Structures are given as structure tokens and as C-alpha cells.
């Protein structure tokens, strides 16, 4: 395992399934694992890591096919494979029981992984997770599933750099909060060969994966769960939090007013405090209870 110091957290590499996987690590205590969304990576958590690591030992991987981790054309793009790779990452690093935080597609991955090994995850935090009840973006997903479109999208998107910035800004409730440094960090991995191609592969299995996620929710219904949404999320419908929460015996919804799809970047202090408060509680939250943070 190689290591490079990066401020208050370290960048590390480990071999999972024969692939080099990058992850960020910081802190001491009970393990807490952070999962990025589609076309995201560990750097999206860099502000939240420092806040959460004051209490927990935090791990944020670039799952294979994403970020700076190795990506091959043979990598299976379906959700069940992503969940399996996550579990093997935990095994390889030596993480046993832990808290699991998943954003967007990473939230779907967290649900499926936890349904396979529910005793391993004491708490779930799902940040605007992709789910069957959100209707936002369905037309775009349908277009990308057209074979010809899916084939030309990656090279076209790498060439049309202003278009990349447009979609990243849409993830913010207030785009003025997106710094040039943060924008550059988002653009870094998607310009790597194979990353957008893997993303298109995930889109092709999206409908089946959402059905699988819905089925998997029965296996995690007893895990205390926090659902976090930005009120201005334009990627995953905030109203889908309600039907999703009903699939859990104990789920709380926390809304960060004014934030978009990545509240841990846009409002890291508020986000971290919500998560830390949830993890610190010993009693389960009531199903359907809601909290709004302004």
C-alpha cells in the first residue's frame, strides 16, 4: 500500500479484485465509510472528511471505474457488482462493522451492500440516493441508453468542456458557491479514458438496478437510517425521500435548505453536524420524522 499525505487526510492505494483502488483516510475511532455518486469520487468528500474525522475513522474510496482508481472495459457496471466490490474493499482494508454514508448512486450501492451484509452496518446515511421514486432525469437516462448515443457521449463530453461545467453547476443549489478549485476537482476524473464509458454502462442497467434496489430495501429496513437532501436538488427528486423513508422501520429525513445534490460540498458544516448528531444518538429515529436545516 502506498501513501501520500494530503493535508489532514492521506491518499492511499490498495488492490481489490486485481485493480488498484484509491481511497482517502483520516481520523481514529469507529469506521465510517463514504461512497461517492455516479461520475464522482473521494475528493467530493474532502471538506466533510475533516469534520467527520474528528470523531470517526473515515474512509472514502474511489470505487473501481470511478475517480482515480483503475478502470477497465471488462468491469461489470451493474449495481450488484458495485456492491460486491464495496464489500471486498472493506474486507481488504480490514474494516469490519462500520457506518455507511452513500451519495446518489453511492446511496443505492450502500443499500444493496447493506442488504447483503446487514449485520455489518450499524447505521446508514443516504444522501439524495438514486431511487425508484425519483422521476428527475428519466428522459436523459433514456436517451443515453440508445446505443448510438451512448457510444458517442463519452468522447463528445470530454471534448465539450463547457458542457461538463454546466452539469456540475446544476448539482449546486447556489452555483455561486462552486469555486474554481472545486469545479476543477470534479472535472479531473471524468476526463480520464474509460470513466465516462463506465458511467454510460451504469446508465444502461439503471432500470433493472432501481428494481433491484427496491427489492433490497426489505433487507435493510431494520437499520437506523438518515436520509439527507438539499432542498434545491435538481438531480434526485427531494419528494422521493418520503416514499423511500416508508421502507424503513426507523428513518429520519433531514433537509438542508438552499443546498443542491452535493450538500457535503456546498454546506459541509451543516451536513457534518447532521450526520454526527444522527450517529451519536443511541435511540432510533421515528419513521417519517423530518428536520429542516436552514
Image: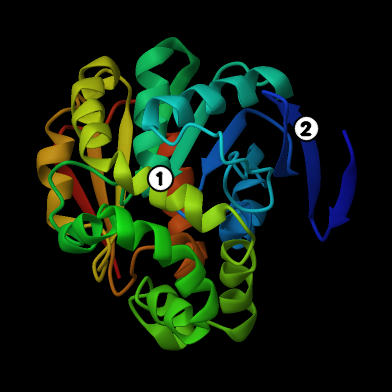
C-alpha span from label 1 to label 2: 24 Å
- Give the residue displayed 40% in from the left and 58% down from the top: 151
Image coloring type:
rainbow
Count of numbered circles on the image = 2
Badge 1 element: helix
- Badge 1 is on which residue? 201
Dot in front, 1 or 2: 1
Residue 140 placed where, x, y %? Answer: 23, 63
Residue 170 image offset from top left, x and y in percent? 34, 76
x, y percentage for residue 148?
Answer: 32, 59
Does 234 sit left or right of 95 as displayed? left
Instruction: Give the labeled residue for mark 2.
Output: 14
Residue drawn 17% across and 61% down? 136
- Ranked by sequence position, the earlier of labels 1 and 2 is 2
Q: Nearer the viewer, residue 159 or 226?
A: 159
Q: Secondary structure at mark 2?
A: strand
Q: Give the residue furthest to the front.
A: 148
- With respect to residue 243, does 195 lie above or below? below
Q: Is residue 115 left or right of residue 47?
A: left
Left or right of 41, for residue 169: left
The answer to whether residue 60 is seen in the rendering is: yes
Q: Residue at x 40, y 21 (%)?
A: 114
Looking at the rendering, which quadrant does residue 237 occupy? bottom left
| Quadrant placement of the C terminus | bottom left
Crowding at dot 2, Cα within 10 Å, few <14 / some 14-19 / many 20+, comes out as: some
Asked whether the residues under the numbered discs 1 and 2 touch, taking CB atoms below 8 Å apart as contact, a structural biologist would say: no
Is residue 237 at all visible to an observer of this figure? no
Residues packed near mark 1 inside 10 Å, few (<14), some (14 to 19) or many (20 plus): some
* 142 left or right of 97 in image: left
Amino acid at each position: 500500500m502506498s501513501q501520500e499525505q494530503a493535508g489532514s487526510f492521506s491518499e492511499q492505494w490498495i488492490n481489490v479484485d486485481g485493480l488498484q483502488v484509491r481511497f482517502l483516510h483520516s481520523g481514529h475511532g469507529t469506521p465510517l465509510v463514504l461512497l461517492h455518486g455516479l461520475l464522482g469520487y473521494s475528493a467530493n468528500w474532502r471538506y466533510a472528511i475533516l469534520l467527520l474525522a474528528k470523531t470517526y475513522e473515515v474512509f472514502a474510496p474511489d470505487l473501481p471505474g470511478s475517480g482515480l482508481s483503475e478502470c477497465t472495459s471488462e468491469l461489470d457496471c451493474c449495481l450488484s457488482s458495485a456492491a460486491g466490490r464495496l464489500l471486498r474493499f472493506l474486507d481488504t482494508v480490514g474494516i469490519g462493522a462500520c457506518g455507511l454514508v452513500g451519495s446518489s448512486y453511492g446511496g443505492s450501492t450502500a443499500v444493496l451492500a447493506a442488504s447483503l451484509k446487514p449485520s455489518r452496518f450499524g447505521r446508514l446515511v443516504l444522501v439524495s440516493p438514486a431511487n425508484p421514486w425519483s422521476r428527475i432525469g428519466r428522459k436523459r437516462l433514456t436517451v443515453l441508453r440508445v446505443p448510438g448515443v451512448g457510444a458517442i457521449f463519452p468522447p463528445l463530453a470530454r471534448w465539450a468542456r463547457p458542457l461538463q461545467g454546466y452539469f456540475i453547476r446544476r448539482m449546486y443549489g447556489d452555483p455561486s458557491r462552486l469555486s474554481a478549485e472545486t469545479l476543477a476537482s470534479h472535472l479531473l476524473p471524468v476526463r480520464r479514458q474509460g470513466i465516462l464509458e463506465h458511467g454510460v454502462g451504469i446508465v444502461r442497467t439503471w432500470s433493472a438496478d432501481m428494481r433491484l434496489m427496491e427489492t433490497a430495501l426489505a433487507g435493510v429496513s431494520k437499520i437506523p437510517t438518515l436520509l439527507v437532501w438539499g432542498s434545491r436538488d435538481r438531480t434526485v427528486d427531494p419528494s422521493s425521500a418520503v416514499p423511500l423513508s416508508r421502507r424503513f422501520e426507523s428513518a429520519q429525513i433531514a433537509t438542508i435548505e438552499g443546498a443542491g445534490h452535493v450538500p457535503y460540498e456546498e454546506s459541509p458544516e451543516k451536513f457534518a453536524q447532521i450526520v454526527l448528531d444522527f450517529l451519536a444518538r443511541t435511540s432510533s429515529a421515528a419513521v417519517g420524522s423530518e428536520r429542516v436545516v436552514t
